[in-house]
Image (tube, rainbow, N blue to C red):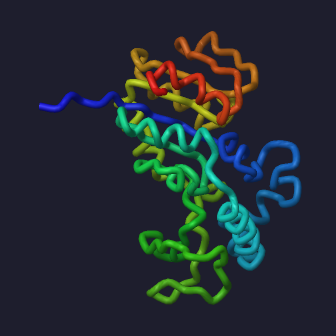
Amino acid sequence: MSKRKKKIIVFSGAGISAESGIQTFRDSGGLWENYKIEDVATPEAWQKNPALVLDFYNQRRKQIIEAQPNNAHYFFALLEDNYDVQIITQNIDNLHERAGSTKVLHLHGEIMKARSTFNHSLVYNLTSWEIKLGDKCEKGSQLRPHIVWFNEAVPNMVVAIDLLHQADFFIIVGTSLNVYPAAGILNYVSPQTKKILIDPKDFNLNQSNGIIHIKKTAALGVNDLKNFFDIN
């Protein structure tokens, strides 16, 4: 009988993609400085001006297609050689997949997919950067980005919580512990799970159950994990 591989859960956020040149929403110079949330990332925005919403995500999609995975993305894919690795990401890009990770759960949707406006089970892979008005699903309804907008439910959160219970190691990278769902996700991780945070910012971790804090960016911080996970 083969020995069970230890399970690593990686919880990633905008910071890991920012190092690949993808603009974040909240940071200075981010996307929200040029757009109002209510104009491009809510169901109401879609009802009011679908052309604007499509253009916003088309431009993001073009940027993501041109971006490349960085050292952190490749490192987590490499871990699959010796561990059972599950990525849970708040990011809508596909950089984890392009780096070689085979198990990626997207909490907020996937920008390289489109879905039916009226039947959310009809989801399609995109082969280009653009969704146009008039592009329809097989049932005849307009296609929209396969994204979880503000004021919409996050259905994959239930799946993520179940996965967190199974973790031997939990690595948080590129996301603040002060913003939900990251702020609450630690509540679902076992006290016995080894927890590692990779982020250059200072955090008050006194109540965070023994987190190891690597105060570096994602692409640099994963180098410190090589010895931790005995990787050369």
- What residue appears at the point 75 percent right and 20 percent down from the top-left corner? 202
Judge by depth and name the residue closer to the eye, 82 or 102. Answer: 82
212 lies above or below 146:
above
Count of numbered circles on the image: 0
Q: Residue at x 77, y 60 (%)?
A: 38
Farthest left residue?
Answer: 1
Say whether residue 220 is left or right of residue 74: right
Q: Is residue 205 above or below residue 95?
A: above
Quarter of the image for residue 109 reads bottom right
Residue drawn at x 59%, y 34% is 182
The residue at 33%/28% (across/down) is 6
In which quadrant is the N terminus drawn? Answer: top left
Q: Nearer the viewer, residue 15 or 53?
A: 15
Quarter of the rendering containing residue 217: top right
Asked whether the viewer can see residue 63, the reply is yes
- Residue nearest the observer in this picture, 182 or 46: 182
Percent position of residue 200, x then y: 73, 26
The spot of residue 74 in percent (x, y) is: 54, 43
- Residue 183: horizontal and vertical position, in percent? 61, 30
Tell me where residue 177 appears, x and y as whole percent: 65, 29
Regarding residue 152, the answer to whether it shows in the image is no
Drawn side of residue 198 relative to residue 2, left or right = right
